[in-house]
Amino acid sequence: MKQIKLTFIAVSLFFGINNYTHAQEQLKIGYVNVEYVMSQWPKLKAVKSELQTYEKQLLSEITVKEQELQTKYAEYQKNAASLSDAIRQAKEIEIQSLDNQIKLYRTNAQTKFAERQQEKLKPLFDEVSDKINEVAKEKNYSHIFNQTIEANSVLLYAKNESDNLSIDVLKKLGVEVPKEDLPTTDK
């Protein structure tokens, strides 16, 4: 009986150590500086330019409406003393209505811009994510972290610069960037 227990313990230890070793071999962690990748990608630069043009168009339309409001208000102030109460009240309602329309238009413009931004950027982020997944699978990584979030380093330590897959992801996106241009983990 004692020998069966010892055999059972030995087999358990063997499988436990074997599983532990196997698990250690499967864990391979890498990182990508997604912010850097996106900043180097011409496709994103083109979309940002398009979004800036759209934003300027929306702002221009708001400016035209605001100028119209200012003109009507200046005209009202200039002539208010000579207007009858009914006409003065009608002009005040017209000015207030125009002001409300501008506020609504501004809110709608912000919503439209946010929707357009989401519509244009989401496919790009998805494409980068797909390329990160491809590189991770090709290089047999089990986990990939983002090196920075909004220009703040979240990667505290990386033993090997070879675990930085940013250049590989850029290559997958069709962008050639010299290795010396790659941001390092040193901050």
Image: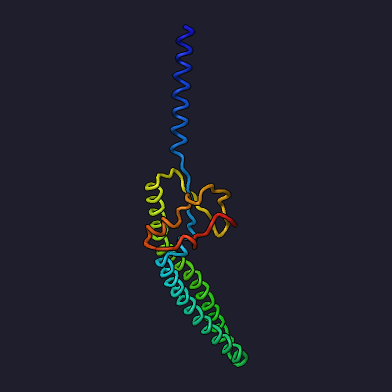
Task: From the viewer's side, name the closer residue of 179 and 33.
Answer: 179
Task: From the viewer's side, name the closer residue of 53 and 93.
Answer: 53
Q: Is residue 82 visible?
A: yes
Task: From the viewer's side, name the closer residue of 57 and 45.
Answer: 45
Position in image of residue 103 (x %, y %): 53, 73
Which residue is rendered at x = 45% and y = 23% of the image?
A: 14
Position in image of residue 146 (x %, y %): 50, 52
Residue most toward the right?
81
Position in image of residue 148 (x %, y %): 53, 55
Which residue is rendered at x = 46% and y = 68% of the image?
A: 113
Q: Quadrant of residue 89?
A: bottom right
Residue most toward the top?
1
Which residue is rendered at x = 48% and y = 79% of the image?
A: 60
Note whether 76 is above or below 140 in the view shown. below
Which residue is rendered at x = 40% and y = 44% of the image?
A: 140
Q: Is residue 86 visible?
A: no
Position in image of residue 99 (x %, y %): 54, 77
